[in-house]
Image (cartoon, rainbow, N blue to C red):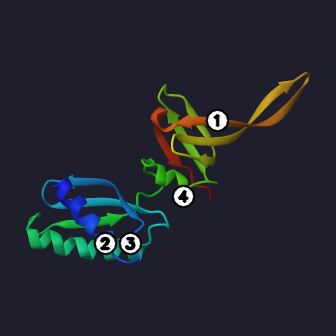
Amino acid sequence: MEQTIKAFLEEIFKEEGLEDCFFVEMVLVGDHKLTLYLDCDSGMSFRKCQRVSRMLESRIEEKGLMTEKYTLDVSSPGTDRPLKFQRQYAKNIGRKLKITDGEGETFEGTLSVVNEEGIRIEYKERIKEGKKKKTIVVEKDLLFENINKAIVKTSF
């Protein structure tokens, strides 16, 4: 089922205005509820979700992939879902991330660089210098392969 849905999405993503969209995750509950998380380099809007949903719905019904009464939800991953792809990191440069690495260590900082191998975050740290404390900016490089979880922190 997942491969068929991905193939449908590849076709849909060739449509004008959807070329920079990509598949993130699929959650299937039985044969009656399908939730898709999609993202776009230019940002996923309600209109794009709605358009993809309608196009996908017609293909699902045409092929009889789901039961007669089913629910299809098409959404962006949202801030509570971890980043999975380099493309998602790139669009979040300048935002604060909470990252857990492969050893279970957690870091919070502002995403400043994204490249093919990994990312760089910047955060402030207080250090003791003589009898006084001083705040310094620390840059930490992390390889994608060493990131277990990265979530965008929202601030209000």
Instruction: State the separation of the CA atoms marked 1 and 4.
Output: 19 Å
**Which circle's residue, 3 or 4, is located before the other in the chain?**
3
Instruction: State the separation of the CA atoms marked 2 and 4.
Output: 21 Å
Other-residue count near label 4 (Cα within 10 Å), few / some / many at <14 / 14–19 / ≥20: some
Residue 1 vs residue 27, the one in the foreground: 1
Residue occupied by mark 2: 52
The residue shown at (48%, 32%) is: 146
In percent of width and height, residue 102 lies at 47, 29
The quarter holding residue 75 reads bottom left
Numbered disc 3: secondary structure: loop
Numbered disc 4: secondary structure: loop
Q: Amino acid at mark 1?
A: Lys
Q: Are marks 2 and 3 in contact (CB under 8 Å)?
A: yes
Instruction: State the separation of the CA atoms marked 3 and 1.
Output: 34 Å
142 vs 64: above or below? above
Q: Amino acid at mark 4?
A: Lys
**Which circle's residue, 1 or 4, is located before the other in the chain?**
4
Q: Amino acid at mark 2?
A: Val
Mark on residue 140? 1
The residue shown at (54%, 28%) is: 105
Q: Are marks 1 and 2 in contact (CB under 8 Å)?
A: no
Residue occupied by mark 3: 18
Query: Which of label 3 and label 1 is nearer to you?
Result: 3
Instruction: State the separation of the CA atoms marked 1 and 2.
Output: 38 Å
Residue occupied by mark 4: 91
Other-residue count near label 3 (Cα within 10 Å), few / some / many at <14 / 14–19 / ≥20: some
**Which circle's residue, 2 or 3, is located before the other in the chain?**
3
